Amino acid sequence: MFHFASLSQVGESMRMPMRYLLDNAANGIRLIDACVRHGVGRFVLSSTAALFNLDSAEPIPEDAPIDPQSAYGDSKWMLERALRWAGQVHGLRFACLRYFNAAGSDPAGRLGEDHRPESHLIPLVIDAALGRRPALDVYGDDYPTEDGTCIRDYVHVSDLASAHLLALEALDRGAVIWNLGNGTGHSVRQVIASVEHVSGLKVPYQVVARRAGDASVLVASSTRAQQAGWQPAHGDLDDIVATAFAWRKAHPNGYGD
Ligand SMILES: NC(=O)c1ccc[n+]([C@@H]2O[C@H](COP(=O)([O-])OP(=O)(O)OC[C@H]3O[C@@H](n4cnc5c(N)ncnc54)[C@H](O)[C@@H]3O)[C@@H](O)[C@H]2O)c1
């Protein structure tokens, strides 16, 4: 079982925590239970960097303290814990893959990113560059980072896909808990610069107030996945942005076409 379905917005989860706990945690636990009862032996969970509450420049390893600051993050932690019980008592083999910032589009151009409403930085920056939305809001430039904007670890969706295949092999040797990122952080201003570089367009943006709950830096240490043979092929930010930009240009209305 690959379990990707989820409500997935941190901010929304702070307005509707019960919705997140019911849809993500309660329904997810029912799904795990159904797998146990019907002999589904392997379970791979889309987990998240939102389990962590660290604000350090150091890449975050898997055994860093878990302290989710949102109902979204906590709902994934509840599922990770349910999987541990299902593994310990019922022998379910499982993987918890904690994606940092999933980004980019299928390099072959078949699949792209189209959230509604869009909440992810790279598609928002691209749409601002293409004039498809007003100037981008940058939430704060007074964080303790070099340019004052938040730093995140952007990891290409194709690299996440390859990590899932490796995890499927690895979970036969024991529980898999992997943080998945490139181990390199990029600030919001660096993402804007990358979109301008890749597209040749100017990105209109304005700095607005900080958003509640945003850590200044979130970067993954993915040593465990690397030890299992994971080698991201699209670690370069311009490469990630180029795939996202190509898909958006080819599909200006996303999947609405
Ligand atoms: N995008 C990221 O950066 C990121 C980072 C960490 C973890 N994740 C996790 O990865 C997974 C995929 O993320 P995404 O960015 O594609 O999110 P997404 O919001 O685009 O897709 C999740 C989909 O799940 C569906 N869904 C929600 N509850 C459902 C339910 N009860 N039954 C059936 N479908 C349901 C939603 O309608 C949505 O289409 C999610 O589990 C998310 O929490 C994503």
Image (cartoon, helix red, strand yellow):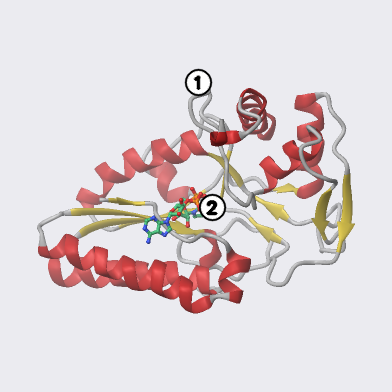
Is disc 1 surrounded by few (<14), some (14 to 19) or many (20+) residues within 10 Å?
Answer: few
Q: Evaluate whether residue 119 shows in this view.
A: yes
Q: Check mark 2 vs ligand 1: CB closer than 8 Å? yes or no.
A: no
Residue 62 in the image: state x and y as whole percent.
46, 61
Residue marked by disc 2: 221
Is disc 2 surrounded by few (<14), some (14 to 19) or many (20+) residues within 10 Å?
Answer: many
For the C terminus, the image quarter is top right
The mark tally for this picture is: 2
Residue marked by disc 1: 108
**Could you give the CA–CA distance between mark 2 and mark 1, rounded to whole angstroms?**
28 Å
Residue 227 higher or lower than 66, as above or below? above
Q: Nearer the viewer, mark 2 or mark 1?
A: 1
Q: Which residue is drawn at 53% across and 24% down?
A: 107
Q: What residue type is labelled 1?
A: Ala
Residue 209 in the image: state x and y as whole percent.
85, 66
Q: Residue at x 40, y 68 (%)?
A: 23
Instruction: Report the side of 128 relative to 45 (left or right).
Output: right
Q: Which amino acid does label 2 sit on?
A: Ser
Residue that extends furthest to the bottom in the rendered view of this protein:
18
SS at mark 1 in the image: loop
Q: In front: 176, or 5? A: 5
Q: Evaluate whether residue 65 shows in this view.
A: no
Q: In front: 176, or 6? A: 6
Residue 48 in the image: state x and y as whole percent.
49, 59
Residue 99 higher or lower than 158, as above or below? below
Residue 140 in the image: state x and y as whole percent.
83, 61
Q: In front: 255, or 140? A: 255
Instruction: Report the side of 109 relative to 177 (left or right).
Output: right
Residue that extends furthest to the front in the rendered view of this protein:
257
SS at mark 2 in the image: loop
Q: Which residue is drawn at 62% across and 23% down?
A: 250
Mark positioned earlier in the residue sequence (2 or 1): 1
